[in-house]
């Protein structure tokens, strides 16, 4: 079964580095993120496990981006709520 883990924490505390160490994926993909060494947008990565995939949502930690984080997490939460309600194909 797939699981999603939100990686949230204080700015510059190693969230993106942790996700990269676990998955090999650099989630800071924007030019501005690389230039500043600071996450600006949500980043996504996943890891294949025996029991399914672990998905990581890497959030920016800087206070200036908290609104972006909350908005995007709300959308992700709603999406997770709505998708299981899709009618079956039978
Ligand atoms: N010494 C040390 N430095 C680390 C470690 N993990 C990350 N860093 C360094 O800390 C800095 C910030 O790492 P990031 O992974 O970008 O931190 P972040 O929490 O994703 O930062 P934001 O997304 O901007 O909040 C980088 O320069 C990393 O190289 C660690 O375990 N030890
Ligand atoms: Mg980061």
Image (spheres, helix red, strand yellow):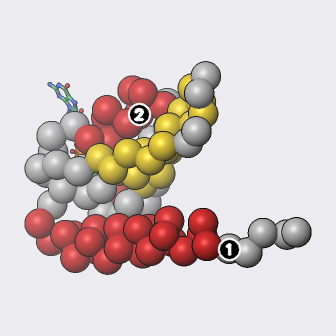
Task: State whether label 1 is within 8 Å of ligand 2.
Answer: no
Residue located 22% across and 37% down the image = 14
Q: Secondary structure at mark 2?
A: helix
Question: Does 17 sit above or below residue 5?
Answer: above
Residue at x-position 41% and y-position 34%: 20
* CB of mark 2 near ligand 1 (< 8 Å): yes
Decide if residue 19 is on the left or right side of residue 50: left
Q: Is residue 36 visible?
A: no
Residue highlighted by disc 2 = 20
Q: Earlier in the sequence, mark 1 or mark 2?
A: 2
Q: Position of residue 60 (x, y in %)?
A: 26, 58
Residue 30 vertical placement versus 25 (above, below): below
Q: Residue at horizontal 38%, vertical 36%?
A: 19
| SS for callout 1 | loop
Question: Which residue matches tag 1?
Answer: 86
Q: Residues within 10 Å of mark 2 (few under 14, many from 20)?
A: some
- Front position in the image: 46 or 62: 46
In the rendered structure, the answer to whether residue 34 lies left or right of residue 88 reads: left
The residue at the point 16 percent across, 48 percent down is: 9
Kindly indicate the quadrant of the structure image that contains residue 39. bottom left
x and y, in percent, of residue 69 in the image: 28, 68
Look at the picture and state if 31 lies above or below 85. above
Q: Quadrant of the N terminus?
A: top right
Q: Is residue 70 left or right of residue 78?
A: left
Q: Nearer the viewer, residue 8 or 50?
A: 50
Q: How many marks can you see?
A: 2
Residue lying farthest right? Answer: 90
Measure the alpha-carbon separation of dots 1 and 2.
Answer: 33 Å
Rendered view: 6 above or below 78: above
Q: Quadrant of the C terminus?
A: bottom right
Q: Residue furthest top?
A: 50
> 82 and 10: which one is in front?
82
């Amino acid at each position: 079964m797939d699981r999603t883990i939100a990686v949230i924490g204080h700015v510059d505390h190693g969230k993106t580095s942790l996700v990269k160490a676990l998955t090999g994926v650099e989630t800071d993909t924007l030019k501005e993120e690389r230039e500043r060494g600071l996450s600006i947008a949500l980043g996504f990565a996943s890891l294949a496990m025996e029991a399914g995939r672990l998905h990581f949502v890497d959030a920016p930690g800087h206070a200036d981006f908290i609104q972006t984080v909350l908005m995007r997490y709300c959308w992700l939460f709603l999406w997770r709520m709505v998708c299981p309600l899709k009618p079956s194909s039978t």
